[in-house]
Amino acid sequence: MARRLRILSNLKVKPETGVAWIVGFSSSSSSSSSSSSSVPPPSPTAAAPADHLPPLITVVAFVNCLHFSGTSSSSLQPNYEEEAEDLRILLPRGLEIVGAVVSSSGDTAATKNGATRAGDFAFGLRQELGLAANSGSDGITVIAALAVESLSTNESVMCYSWYDGSRLQLLEEEIVQEWPWRDTCLLRCQLQLSMPLYLPSIVTLAEYEEQVIGSVDSIISNLKSSRAVFLFERQGETVLIHASDKSNAKAAAADVQQIPSESTLSSLQGSILQPAENQVQIRRTLNSIPVPMKLILMIRPSCSKTSSPFMQYLPAKSLVELHLLRMSLDVLCLAPSHLSAADAATLLVVPALCDQLNVMCMMANKNATHNPKVCAFHFCPLSCPVTTIYDLSYGESEIALVEHRKALHHRLGLPLDRPMLRVANALTLSSLESSSNHSAGGKRLLDVHIGLPASTVAGGCQSLIAGSYEYCHYLQDRFDDNGWGCAYRSLQTIISWFRLQHYTSITVPTHREIQECLVEIGDKEASFIGSQEWIGAIELSFVLDKLLGVTSKILSVRSGAEMPSKGRELALHFRTQGTPVMIGGGVLAYTLLGVDFNELTGEIMFLILDPHYTGGEDLKSIRSGGWCGWKGTITTNGQQFFLANKFYNLLLPQRPITV
């Protein structure tokens, strides 16, 4: 049977640690069939069948290896136990480690040796995950890949081979443009736990761990038992799936529809989701992923007969206090569409929940000195979703969380100068949820400068804002600030930029909240709150520092006629920082989104977003009225845009270098 390799077109790999894992899934040409006897993808809790040799493997991501054992470069190899512990949580259940990549110098001897090492590494990790034996004797092959750095492009050239434990066979890959979602189904199961712990006023770590481990073990035991059932909700009815014990399913309630155990995910998905809802664009990610099928876990009573409620009384040996340990489980699983719903729940969802519970248990025991708040979040910085678990009891700025995010950035090959794995970046995987939280008063327009006519600067170089923003202007939020609130609106636009780039999760502040902030830091008197007093660039810098921890630079010009002299500095700001700039002069404030600057002639035009607009959210009116557009120092009707007799301050917020 010929082996084929399918790789997503946007994947790039450069093993930062010398070794990277290849993430993918296998499928067969018969995957479109609905046969319930089809072999499901290997589960990390059970070894794959010996004759399971799929003809097609789809590669969806590369993740760096972080944990190594050994000291010298020749003896260095992955620490499979620690790697497996991380990857079980990071990757959706159903995605596998299908191979490994090692860096190579490119000479012939190193190439063959490197490919063999990559294959051995892949088999070693798969064995730790329970996916395959330590060699290819069981019929399983892996991808052994080399990353040879090109001196001309400074990018890695990939060379792929099949490896069965002893032999290498070169292969050619097929580049595909989109995820093959039609062959797969995304499942999601959430579980909110509040576990009661009865602890003495002075508790030892051993006593705390004993109760936590006992509670978690009891939950895992129920998950793996025949008492676990899953509900698929749909309009007007609920579909019931018995996960573990399909043959002994009990009669369901009258309003719950049971489905045959052999029903496939594709048939169930078609009945639950309308065609138009099958795929949505998750805003501000590189990928389109389908709305997941949502499963609700229920544990059936252990007694078979109907009985009245009862209460059990267990006296404590000494005086105890009740503590609630809260855990928020949230798992994603990727299943082939032809897999039966019962098998998907048993082989994928239940083991994923158990893995998350075990990791959360360890985190709770580690942080036993305070009240842990352990939550799972999903992100999509790669071509597939990934999951991580945070303890949010100290907030996202706590140093342990920062270091944890840095490690994840290294693992996923993400830049270290911007947040990509904060709670604000987390995916909302529901067609009813929005990935952006708009302020009160309705939805604001985004990125109104996109599609504007070009500026008239001959030979100029455009330097523009990097990222999205909300257009904030007079009379929004049903609040009348006409004549005095332009700087407040410019500040709101700037803060919306930081929100939409996920540097913060705070809501865009109202005028009153901005005033309260300035009073709190001592810049204004209490009477300032509720007033209609103007604010300028200096006050905006105070608010950004207080609310976001963002520092700002201030550029000053004595006259509007001097604004072109700041062209080079402004262009550099947009190239390196990319944040909106507030311009304040006299009693007017504007938001600057970019410049078009000719360094040889000094000619410049400014891309102005004007907060003085008082109309509705009508893009055509905004553009035709010149409320967003390119402005020169002299307007088309001969008026000065920046007045020669006014002093101007320019606020340049600095992009935080943080994860």
Image: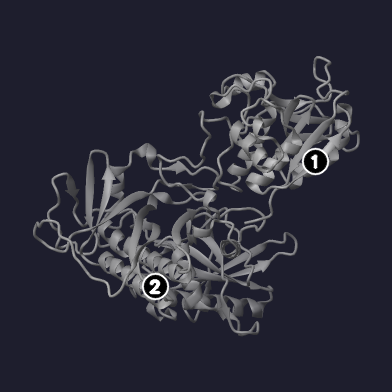
Residue 94 % position (x, y): 39, 62
State how far apart marks 1 and 2 are (Cα).
Answer: 53 Å
Residue beneath the point at 34% across and 75% down? 50
Residue beneath the point at 77% across and 30% down? 584
Residue beneath the point at 86% across and 32% down? 564
Along the horizontal axis of the image, is 211 left or right of 481?
Answer: left
Q: Considering only vertical position in the picture, is 383 above or below 479?
A: below
Q: Which secondary structure lies at badge 1?
A: strand
Residue beneath the point at 57% across and 30% down? 445
Nearer to us in this view, 18 or 39: 18
Read off the residue under disc 1: 554
Residue 496 % position (x, y): 61, 38
Read off the residue under disc 2: 208
The answer to which image quadrant residue 213 occupies is: bottom left
Q: Considering only vertical position in the picture, is 621 above or below 317?
A: above
| Quarter placement of the C terminus | bottom right
